[in-house]
Amino acid sequence: MHDGSPRILGFGTALVIAIAVALAGFAVGQGLERFRMADRSVTVKGLAEKDVDSDYATWTLAFRRGGNEFGAVQKALADDRDRVVAFLRDQGFAAAEVEVRPLQVQDLFAREYAQVNQPLRFNGVGRVVVKTARVSAVEAAALAVDPLIQAGVQLTANDDSGAAGPRYQLRGFNDVKAPLLAEATRNAREQAEKFAAEAGAKLGALKSANQGVITISAGDAQGYDDGTSRTKRLRVVSTFEYELR
């Protein structure tokens, strides 16, 4: 029989009510991934992002010549190659940083599907590749190629990667991996502690963890990293499950 006097809720019931209130006010965007009442656990996601500078650069300077005499095309390419190498030397690059590729001259008339009205018989291309950890030097040199163009060097985008300009890499990825994961872990725990506090519970032991996949994108908000951006944006979303007490 109910006597009208107030009843005292058990700890378990009180915790359930508190958690329900916390769930109502704790947005998914704050990191809450999943709450399971059965085993009193909470799953949260920790986000970490960091912009880092590239530590290696590859720059292919490709140049092209065309003509009707094989020897003339080959000589023009050789002269262009010498100009490119001299330009890079003037920019301060050492011989060990510069790779000179063999010249290539193609007889367009000898192709199986050669066009009858082809204006030039020979088409040639040369490549000089810079590979160095001196990223700033490459970036500066790439903006100073006007003398080459003025000298008649026909720089082209037809290089090994299908595009012109330097390509930047992050070879020291492992050096920034650990701090990034540590930040994601701290972020996740902060979200879990906040949820537990709002639910009137205490955060218990870590039950499981998934560090997630670190993605690398262009740091200039272009999204996919095609190598043209010197700044790389690293992002990871890690998932953790904690007990609630």
Image (cartoon, grey):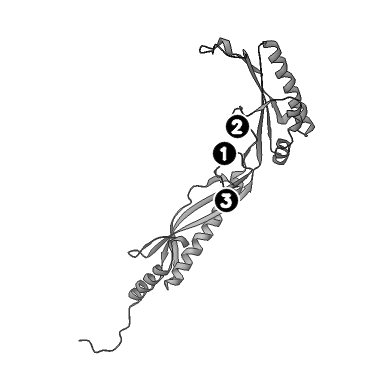
In the rendered image, residue 49, in percent from the top left (x then y), is placed at 56, 53
**Mark 3 to mark 1 CA distance (whole Å):** 24 Å
Q: Quadrant of residue 43?
A: bottom left
Relative to 92, does residue 73 appear above or below in the rendering? above
Q: Quadrant of residue 109?
A: top right
* Residue pictured at 72% horizontal, 37% vertical: 143
| Range covered by the magenta-colored residues | 224-229
User: Which residue position is annotated with label 2?
Assistant: 163
Badge 1 amino acid: Asp
Local packing at callout 2 (Cα closer than 10 Å; few below 14, some 14-19, many 20+) is some
Local packing at callout 3 (Cα closer than 10 Å; few below 14, some 14-19, many 20+) is few
Q: Quadrant of residue 150?
A: top right
- Membership of 154 in magenta stretch: no
Q: Which mark is residue 47?
A: none
Specify whether 14 is left or right of 85: left
- Secondary structure under the numbered disc 3 in the rendered image: helix
Specify whether 28 is left or right of 82: left
**Mark 2 to mark 3 CA distance (whole Å):** 33 Å
Closer to the chain start, of discs 3 and 1, is 3
* Residue pictured at 33% horizontal, 78% vertical: 10
Closer to the chain start, of discs 2 and 3, is 2
Q: Quadrant of the C terminus?
A: bottom left
In the rendered image, residue 99, in percent from the top left (x then y), is placed at 69, 26
Relative to 171, does residue 188 appear above or below in the rendering? below
Q: Quadrant of the N terminus?
A: bottom left
User: Which residue position is annotated with label 3?
Assistant: 178
Numbered disc in front, either 2 or 3: 2
Secondary structure, magenta segment, majority class: loop
